[in-house]
Image (cartoon, helix red, strand yellow):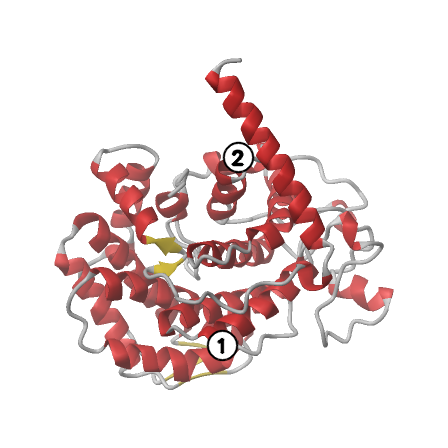
Amino acid sequence: MSHRSQGLLTKGIFALVAALVAALLAALPGGGRAEAAPAAFSHPGVLVSRAQLDFVRGKVQAGAQPWKGAYDQMMASKYASQSRTPKPRAVVECGSYSNPNYGCTDEREDAIAAYTNALAWYVTRDAKYAQKAIQLMDAWSATITDHTNSNAPLQTGWAGSVWPRAAEIIRYTYTGWPNMNRFATMLRNVYLPEVINGSKSNGNWELSMMEAAVGISVFLDDRTSYGKAVTRYLNRVAAYVYLDTDGALPRTVPGSGLDTRDEIVGYWQGQSTFVTGLTQETCRDFTHTGYGISSISHVAETSRIQGEDLYPQVGERLRQALGFQSKYQRGEAVPSWLCGGSLNLGLGPVTEVGYNAMHNRLGYAMTNTQALTESQRPAGSNNLFVAWETLTHGDNLS
Protein backbone atom coordinates (compact mmCIF):
# COMPACT_ATOMS: atom_id res chain seq x y z
CA MET A 1 0.00 0.00 0.00
CA SER A 2 1.33 3.47 -0.90
CA HIS A 3 2.01 6.14 1.74
CA ARG A 4 -0.88 8.15 0.27
CA SER A 5 -3.27 5.20 0.55
CA GLN A 6 -2.14 4.54 4.10
CA GLY A 7 -2.71 8.19 4.95
CA LEU A 8 -6.21 8.20 3.48
CA LEU A 9 -7.06 4.99 5.32
CA THR A 10 -5.78 6.39 8.61
CA LYS A 11 -7.70 9.61 8.09
CA GLY A 12 -10.88 7.68 7.33
CA ILE A 13 -10.53 5.51 10.44
CA PHE A 14 -9.91 8.62 12.54
CA ALA A 15 -13.01 10.27 11.13
CA LEU A 16 -15.08 7.16 11.90
CA VAL A 17 -13.85 7.02 15.49
CA ALA A 18 -14.46 10.76 15.90
CA ALA A 19 -18.01 10.33 14.59
CA LEU A 20 -18.71 7.53 17.07
CA VAL A 21 -17.34 9.60 19.96
CA ALA A 22 -19.38 12.61 18.84
CA ALA A 23 -22.55 10.54 18.62
CA LEU A 24 -22.03 9.13 22.12
CA LEU A 25 -21.36 12.57 23.57
CA ALA A 26 -24.30 14.11 21.71
CA ALA A 27 -26.59 11.57 23.33
CA LEU A 28 -25.69 12.81 26.81
CA PRO A 29 -27.85 15.47 28.51
CA GLY A 30 -26.75 18.92 27.45
CA GLY A 31 -24.63 17.47 24.66
CA GLY A 32 -22.03 16.15 27.08
CA ARG A 33 -20.03 17.59 29.94
CA ALA A 34 -16.94 19.75 29.78
CA GLU A 35 -14.14 20.49 32.17
CA ALA A 36 -15.11 23.50 34.27
CA ALA A 37 -12.20 25.46 32.82
CA PRO A 38 -8.58 24.91 31.79
CA ALA A 39 -6.11 24.83 34.67
CA ALA A 40 -4.29 27.73 33.03
CA PHE A 41 -5.36 29.84 30.08
CA SER A 42 -3.32 29.99 26.89
CA HIS A 43 -2.61 33.45 25.44
CA PRO A 44 -3.24 34.79 22.86
CA GLY A 45 -6.14 32.42 22.87
CA VAL A 46 -9.46 33.90 21.77
CA LEU A 47 -10.40 32.37 18.39
CA VAL A 48 -6.79 32.51 17.17
CA SER A 49 -3.65 31.13 18.80
CA ARG A 50 -0.07 32.26 18.43
CA ALA A 51 0.63 29.21 16.27
CA GLN A 52 -2.26 30.08 13.97
CA LEU A 53 -1.09 33.69 13.77
CA ASP A 54 2.42 32.54 12.91
CA PHE A 55 1.00 30.34 10.15
CA VAL A 56 -0.95 33.30 8.72
CA ARG A 57 2.07 35.58 8.89
CA GLY A 58 4.24 33.07 7.08
CA LYS A 59 1.69 32.50 4.32
CA VAL A 60 1.09 36.21 3.75
CA GLN A 61 4.80 36.99 3.66
CA ALA A 62 5.27 34.17 1.13
CA GLY A 63 2.47 35.55 -1.03
CA ALA A 64 0.58 32.26 -0.76
CA GLN A 65 -3.12 32.03 -1.60
CA PRO A 66 -5.78 32.29 -0.34
CA TRP A 67 -4.13 34.03 2.61
CA LYS A 68 -2.42 36.83 0.70
CA GLY A 69 -5.67 37.71 -1.08
CA ALA A 70 -7.54 37.60 2.21
CA TYR A 71 -4.95 39.84 3.83
CA ASP A 72 -5.11 42.34 0.96
CA GLN A 73 -8.90 42.38 1.28
CA MET A 74 -8.61 43.11 4.98
CA MET A 75 -6.06 45.87 4.51
CA ALA A 76 -8.19 47.52 1.82
CA SER A 77 -11.22 47.62 4.13
CA LYS A 78 -12.39 50.61 6.14
CA TYR A 79 -11.44 48.75 9.31
CA ALA A 80 -7.73 48.99 8.53
CA SER A 81 -7.79 52.74 7.91
CA GLN A 82 -5.20 54.61 9.95
CA SER A 83 -7.34 57.74 9.81
CA ARG A 84 -10.20 56.05 11.64
CA THR A 85 -11.43 58.05 14.63
CA PRO A 86 -13.05 56.05 17.45
CA LYS A 87 -16.61 57.03 18.36
CA PRO A 88 -17.18 55.86 21.92
CA ARG A 89 -20.36 56.52 23.88
CA ALA A 90 -21.05 56.27 27.59
CA VAL A 91 -24.38 54.55 26.95
CA VAL A 92 -24.91 52.51 23.80
CA GLU A 93 -28.64 52.21 23.12
CA CYS A 94 -29.79 49.54 20.69
CA GLY A 95 -33.43 48.78 19.94
CA SER A 96 -34.96 46.05 17.82
CA TYR A 97 -33.85 46.16 14.18
CA SER A 98 -31.39 48.94 15.10
CA ASN A 99 -34.11 51.40 16.08
CA PRO A 100 -32.82 53.34 17.89
CA ASN A 101 -29.16 53.01 16.99
CA TYR A 102 -27.20 55.21 19.36
CA GLY A 103 -23.62 54.04 19.10
CA CYS A 104 -24.43 50.45 18.15
CA THR A 105 -22.82 50.42 14.70
CA ASP A 106 -19.94 52.58 15.96
CA GLU A 107 -19.17 50.19 18.81
CA ARG A 108 -19.26 47.06 16.67
CA GLU A 109 -17.19 48.58 13.90
CA ASP A 110 -14.61 50.06 16.26
CA ALA A 111 -14.21 46.60 17.81
CA ILE A 112 -13.73 45.01 14.37
CA ALA A 113 -11.26 47.77 13.50
CA ALA A 114 -9.28 47.05 16.67
CA TYR A 115 -9.16 43.35 15.76
CA THR A 116 -8.22 44.19 12.15
CA ASN A 117 -5.35 46.36 13.29
CA ALA A 118 -4.21 43.75 15.78
CA LEU A 119 -4.00 41.20 12.96
CA ALA A 120 -2.21 43.72 10.75
CA TRP A 121 0.29 44.35 13.56
CA TYR A 122 1.01 40.66 13.92
CA VAL A 123 1.57 40.13 10.20
CA THR A 124 3.63 43.27 9.55
CA ARG A 125 5.20 44.02 12.95
CA ASP A 126 4.53 47.66 12.15
CA ALA A 127 3.81 49.32 15.50
CA LYS A 128 1.37 51.82 13.99
CA TYR A 129 -1.23 49.07 13.70
CA ALA A 130 -0.83 48.04 17.32
CA GLN A 131 -1.11 51.67 18.35
CA LYS A 132 -4.29 52.11 16.32
CA ALA A 133 -5.82 49.03 17.98
CA ILE A 134 -4.86 50.45 21.37
CA GLN A 135 -6.31 53.85 20.50
CA LEU A 136 -9.66 52.25 19.68
CA MET A 137 -9.73 50.06 22.78
CA ASP A 138 -8.63 52.90 25.06
CA ALA A 139 -11.28 55.26 23.72
CA TRP A 140 -14.05 52.85 24.60
CA SER A 141 -12.63 51.73 27.93
CA ALA A 142 -12.43 55.39 29.01
CA THR A 143 -16.05 56.07 28.08
CA ILE A 144 -18.62 53.26 28.01
CA THR A 145 -20.68 52.48 31.10
CA ASP A 146 -23.75 50.61 29.83
CA HIS A 147 -25.81 49.06 27.03
CA THR A 148 -29.53 49.74 27.05
CA ASN A 149 -32.81 49.01 25.23
CA SER A 150 -34.14 45.69 23.92
CA ASN A 151 -31.12 44.63 21.86
CA ALA A 152 -28.60 45.39 24.59
CA PRO A 153 -27.79 41.69 25.28
CA LEU A 154 -27.18 40.94 21.61
CA GLN A 155 -25.18 44.12 21.01
CA THR A 156 -23.03 43.36 24.04
CA GLY A 157 -22.53 39.84 22.74
CA TRP A 158 -21.44 40.99 19.31
CA ALA A 159 -19.02 43.69 20.42
CA GLY A 160 -17.95 41.64 23.41
CA SER A 161 -16.98 38.76 21.13
CA VAL A 162 -14.57 40.91 19.13
CA TRP A 163 -12.88 43.11 21.74
CA PRO A 164 -11.09 40.18 23.44
CA ARG A 165 -9.73 38.92 20.13
CA ALA A 166 -7.99 42.23 19.58
CA ALA A 167 -6.96 42.62 23.19
CA GLU A 168 -5.40 39.15 23.43
CA ILE A 169 -3.18 39.75 20.40
CA ILE A 170 -2.02 43.16 21.59
CA ARG A 171 -1.52 42.22 25.24
CA TYR A 172 0.56 39.16 24.52
CA THR A 173 2.52 40.14 21.39
CA TYR A 174 3.08 43.91 21.73
CA THR A 175 4.91 45.83 24.43
CA GLY A 176 3.29 49.01 25.65
CA TRP A 177 -0.40 49.20 26.56
CA PRO A 178 -0.57 51.41 29.67
CA ASN A 179 -4.39 51.32 29.91
CA MET A 180 -4.74 47.55 29.58
CA ASN A 181 -6.11 47.16 33.10
CA ARG A 182 -8.76 49.77 32.42
CA PHE A 183 -9.82 47.79 29.35
CA ALA A 184 -10.02 44.64 31.46
CA THR A 185 -12.19 46.50 33.98
CA MET A 186 -14.50 47.57 31.15
CA LEU A 187 -14.93 43.97 30.01
CA ARG A 188 -15.57 42.77 33.55
CA ASN A 189 -17.98 45.51 34.62
CA VAL A 190 -19.77 46.60 31.44
CA TYR A 191 -19.79 43.53 29.18
CA LEU A 192 -19.60 40.35 31.24
CA PRO A 193 -22.64 40.99 33.49
CA GLU A 194 -24.81 41.67 30.43
CA VAL A 195 -24.01 38.35 28.74
CA ILE A 196 -23.05 35.75 31.35
CA ASN A 197 -26.60 34.77 32.31
CA GLY A 198 -27.71 34.15 28.74
CA SER A 199 -31.01 34.76 27.00
CA LYS A 200 -34.30 33.00 26.37
CA SER A 201 -34.61 34.69 22.95
CA ASN A 202 -33.70 33.01 19.65
CA GLY A 203 -30.66 30.79 19.92
CA ASN A 204 -28.27 33.06 18.04
CA TRP A 205 -28.62 35.59 20.87
CA GLU A 206 -27.44 33.25 23.58
CA LEU A 207 -24.73 31.72 21.41
CA SER A 208 -23.29 35.17 20.64
CA MET A 209 -23.54 36.10 24.30
CA MET A 210 -21.70 32.93 25.35
CA GLU A 211 -19.04 33.61 22.74
CA ALA A 212 -18.48 36.99 24.34
CA ALA A 213 -18.51 35.51 27.85
CA VAL A 214 -15.96 32.84 26.91
CA GLY A 215 -13.62 35.31 25.18
CA ILE A 216 -13.84 37.82 28.01
CA SER A 217 -13.20 35.06 30.55
CA VAL A 218 -10.04 34.03 28.72
CA PHE A 219 -8.76 37.61 28.68
CA LEU A 220 -9.58 38.03 32.38
CA ASP A 221 -8.23 34.57 33.33
CA ASP A 222 -11.62 34.03 34.94
CA ARG A 223 -12.11 30.28 35.34
CA THR A 224 -15.47 30.58 37.08
CA SER A 225 -17.09 32.67 34.35
CA TYR A 226 -15.51 30.50 31.67
CA GLY A 227 -17.01 27.35 33.15
CA LYS A 228 -20.42 28.93 33.56
CA ALA A 229 -20.41 30.18 29.96
CA VAL A 230 -19.31 26.82 28.55
CA THR A 231 -22.06 24.98 30.41
CA ARG A 232 -24.71 27.34 29.03
CA TYR A 233 -23.14 27.13 25.57
CA LEU A 234 -23.29 23.31 25.52
CA ASN A 235 -26.94 23.33 26.50
CA ARG A 236 -27.77 25.89 23.81
CA VAL A 237 -25.85 24.11 21.04
CA ALA A 238 -27.75 20.90 21.80
CA ALA A 239 -31.02 22.86 21.56
CA TYR A 240 -30.05 24.84 18.46
CA VAL A 241 -29.08 22.11 15.99
CA TYR A 242 -31.24 19.03 15.61
CA LEU A 243 -29.83 15.51 15.21
CA ASP A 244 -32.06 12.52 14.59
CA THR A 245 -30.57 10.96 17.74
CA ASP A 246 -32.43 13.64 19.74
CA GLY A 247 -35.70 11.83 19.19
CA ALA A 248 -39.04 13.07 17.88
CA LEU A 249 -38.51 16.65 19.04
CA PRO A 250 -35.54 18.99 19.36
CA ARG A 251 -33.99 19.47 22.76
CA THR A 252 -34.76 22.50 24.86
CA VAL A 253 -32.55 24.44 27.26
CA PRO A 254 -33.19 24.30 31.00
CA GLY A 255 -35.77 26.88 31.99
CA SER A 256 -36.97 27.47 28.43
CA GLY A 257 -40.62 26.96 29.33
CA LEU A 258 -41.11 24.99 26.09
CA ASP A 259 -43.13 22.10 27.45
CA THR A 260 -45.30 20.94 24.55
CA ARG A 261 -44.82 19.96 20.93
CA ASP A 262 -46.80 23.00 19.76
CA GLU A 263 -44.58 25.32 21.80
CA ILE A 264 -41.41 23.75 20.40
CA VAL A 265 -42.71 23.89 16.82
CA GLY A 266 -43.58 27.54 17.32
CA TYR A 267 -40.10 28.25 18.68
CA TRP A 268 -38.64 26.51 15.62
CA GLN A 269 -40.42 29.02 13.37
CA GLY A 270 -43.35 26.70 12.69
CA GLN A 271 -41.23 23.85 11.34
CA SER A 272 -42.77 20.54 12.38
CA THR A 273 -40.58 18.10 10.44
CA PHE A 274 -37.20 17.73 12.09
CA VAL A 275 -34.17 16.42 10.21
CA THR A 276 -30.50 16.28 11.04
CA GLY A 277 -28.77 19.64 10.51
CA LEU A 278 -31.90 21.78 10.81
CA THR A 279 -31.45 24.67 13.22
CA GLN A 280 -33.89 26.51 15.42
CA GLU A 281 -33.70 29.50 13.04
CA THR A 282 -33.39 27.82 9.63
CA CYS A 283 -36.98 28.71 8.81
CA ARG A 284 -36.53 32.26 10.08
CA ASP A 285 -33.64 33.06 7.75
CA PHE A 286 -30.14 31.88 7.00
CA THR A 287 -28.56 35.13 8.15
CA HIS A 288 -29.52 34.65 11.80
CA THR A 289 -28.79 30.94 11.47
CA GLY A 290 -25.32 31.93 10.29
CA TYR A 291 -24.82 34.00 13.42
CA GLY A 292 -25.62 30.97 15.56
CA ILE A 293 -23.40 28.59 13.57
CA SER A 294 -20.57 31.11 13.67
CA SER A 295 -20.65 31.45 17.45
CA ILE A 296 -20.82 27.67 17.85
CA SER A 297 -17.61 27.37 15.83
CA HIS A 298 -15.90 30.31 17.56
CA VAL A 299 -16.41 28.96 21.07
CA ALA A 300 -15.34 25.48 20.01
CA GLU A 301 -12.18 26.90 18.44
CA THR A 302 -11.33 28.93 21.53
CA SER A 303 -11.87 25.86 23.70
CA ARG A 304 -9.47 23.87 21.54
CA ILE A 305 -6.82 26.55 21.94
CA GLN A 306 -7.42 26.48 25.68
CA GLY A 307 -6.77 22.75 25.86
CA GLU A 308 -10.31 21.61 26.71
CA ASP A 309 -11.52 20.79 23.23
CA LEU A 310 -15.30 20.97 22.86
CA TYR A 311 -15.36 19.75 19.26
CA PRO A 312 -16.02 16.15 20.39
CA GLN A 313 -19.20 17.43 22.07
CA VAL A 314 -20.45 19.95 19.52
CA GLY A 315 -18.64 18.99 16.33
CA GLU A 316 -21.30 16.68 14.93
CA ARG A 317 -24.01 19.32 15.34
CA LEU A 318 -21.72 21.95 13.84
CA ARG A 319 -20.82 19.72 10.89
CA GLN A 320 -24.41 18.82 10.15
CA ALA A 321 -25.65 22.41 10.51
CA LEU A 322 -22.98 23.62 8.09
CA GLY A 323 -23.75 20.90 5.57
CA PHE A 324 -27.53 21.31 5.74
CA GLN A 325 -27.48 25.08 5.32
CA SER A 326 -24.68 25.01 2.73
CA LYS A 327 -26.51 22.75 0.29
CA TYR A 328 -29.49 25.09 0.15
CA GLN A 329 -27.32 28.21 0.12
CA ARG A 330 -25.69 26.69 -2.97
CA GLY A 331 -29.05 26.40 -4.70
CA GLU A 332 -30.47 22.94 -4.03
CA ALA A 333 -34.24 22.87 -4.48
CA VAL A 334 -36.17 23.38 -1.26
CA PRO A 335 -38.63 20.54 -0.49
CA SER A 336 -42.18 21.48 0.42
CA TRP A 337 -41.87 20.10 3.97
CA LEU A 338 -39.00 22.48 4.76
CA CYS A 339 -40.08 25.96 5.83
CA GLY A 340 -43.13 25.79 3.58
CA GLY A 341 -40.91 25.24 0.54
CA SER A 342 -39.21 28.63 0.77
CA LEU A 343 -35.97 29.73 2.45
CA ASN A 344 -34.54 33.18 3.12
CA LEU A 345 -30.90 32.68 2.15
CA GLY A 346 -27.83 34.70 3.09
CA LEU A 347 -25.70 32.50 5.33
CA GLY A 348 -22.80 34.97 5.35
CA PRO A 349 -19.01 34.51 5.70
CA VAL A 350 -19.36 32.05 8.57
CA THR A 351 -18.13 28.65 7.37
CA GLU A 352 -14.32 28.84 7.50
CA VAL A 353 -13.75 28.07 11.19
CA GLY A 354 -16.08 25.10 11.39
CA TYR A 355 -15.05 23.76 8.00
CA ASN A 356 -11.36 23.95 8.90
CA ALA A 357 -11.92 22.12 12.16
CA MET A 358 -14.25 19.41 10.92
CA HIS A 359 -12.80 18.84 7.44
CA ASN A 360 -9.11 19.64 7.69
CA ARG A 361 -8.50 18.49 11.27
CA LEU A 362 -11.01 15.68 11.66
CA GLY A 363 -11.25 14.42 8.09
CA TYR A 364 -14.95 14.70 7.23
CA ALA A 365 -15.71 15.18 3.53
CA MET A 366 -18.23 18.06 3.90
CA THR A 367 -18.74 18.39 0.15
CA ASN A 368 -21.35 21.16 0.22
CA THR A 369 -19.62 23.14 2.94
CA GLN A 370 -16.31 22.88 1.10
CA ALA A 371 -17.83 24.10 -2.15
CA LEU A 372 -19.56 27.03 -0.45
CA THR A 373 -16.50 27.94 1.59
CA GLU A 374 -14.17 27.94 -1.40
CA SER A 375 -16.65 29.91 -3.52
CA GLN A 376 -16.83 32.64 -0.88
CA ARG A 377 -13.09 33.11 -0.43
CA PRO A 378 -11.77 35.39 0.73
CA ALA A 379 -14.44 35.62 3.43
CA GLY A 380 -14.78 39.19 4.66
CA SER A 381 -16.77 40.64 7.55
CA ASN A 382 -20.46 40.64 8.37
CA ASN A 383 -19.84 44.00 10.09
CA LEU A 384 -21.19 42.58 13.34
CA PHE A 385 -18.75 40.08 14.87
CA VAL A 386 -17.37 37.93 12.03
CA ALA A 387 -14.21 39.11 10.26
CA TRP A 388 -11.40 37.81 8.04
CA GLU A 389 -11.78 34.09 8.65
CA THR A 390 -10.22 32.93 5.41
CA LEU A 391 -7.13 34.79 6.59
CA THR A 392 -7.15 33.39 10.12
CA HIS A 393 -8.60 29.90 9.65
CA GLY A 394 -8.49 28.99 5.96
CA ASP A 395 -6.78 25.57 5.81
CA ASN A 396 -4.92 26.44 9.02
CA LEU A 397 -4.00 23.32 10.97
CA SER A 398 -1.75 25.10 13.47
Please tell me which residue lies in front, 251 or 94.
Answer: 251
Please state if 394 lies on the left or on the right of 232 as rendered.
Answer: left
- Number of dots carrying numbers: 2
Q: Position of residue 261 (x, y in %)?
A: 86, 64
Mark 2 is on which residue type?
Gln
Please tell me which residue lies in front, 84 or 244.
Answer: 244
Mark 1 is on which residue type?
Thr
Q: Residue at x 19, y 62 (%)?
A: 174
Q: Residues within 10 Å of mark 1 (few under 14, many from 20)?
A: few
Identify the residue position indicated by label 1 in the image.
Answer: 224
Q: Earlier in the sequence, mark 1 or mark 2?
A: 1
Q: Secondary structure at mark 2?
A: helix
For the question of whether residue 327 can be seen, the reply is: yes
Q: Quadrant of residue 172?
A: bottom left
Q: Position of residue 152 (x, y in %)?
A: 50, 78
Please state if 268 lies on the left or on the right of 226 as rendered.
Answer: right
Please tell me which residue lies in front, 10 or 96.
Answer: 10
Q: Quadrant of residue 79?
A: bottom left
Please state if 301 lies on the left or on the right of 244 as rendered.
Answer: left
- Front position among marks 1 and 2: 1
Please tell me which residue lies in front, 149 or 67.
Answer: 67
Q: Position of residue 335 (x, y in %)?
A: 77, 40
Quadrant, the C terminus: top left
Q: Residue at x 16, y 65 (%)?
A: 175
Instruction: Quote the CA–CA distance across marks 1 and 2.
Output: 37 Å
Identify the residue position indicated by label 2 in the image.
Answer: 370
Q: Residues within 10 Å of mark 2 (few under 14, many from 20)?
A: some
Please state if 377 lies on the left or on the right of 300 as rendered.
Answer: left
Q: Is residue 162 above or below residue 124?
A: below
Q: Position of residue 338 (x, y in %)?
A: 76, 47
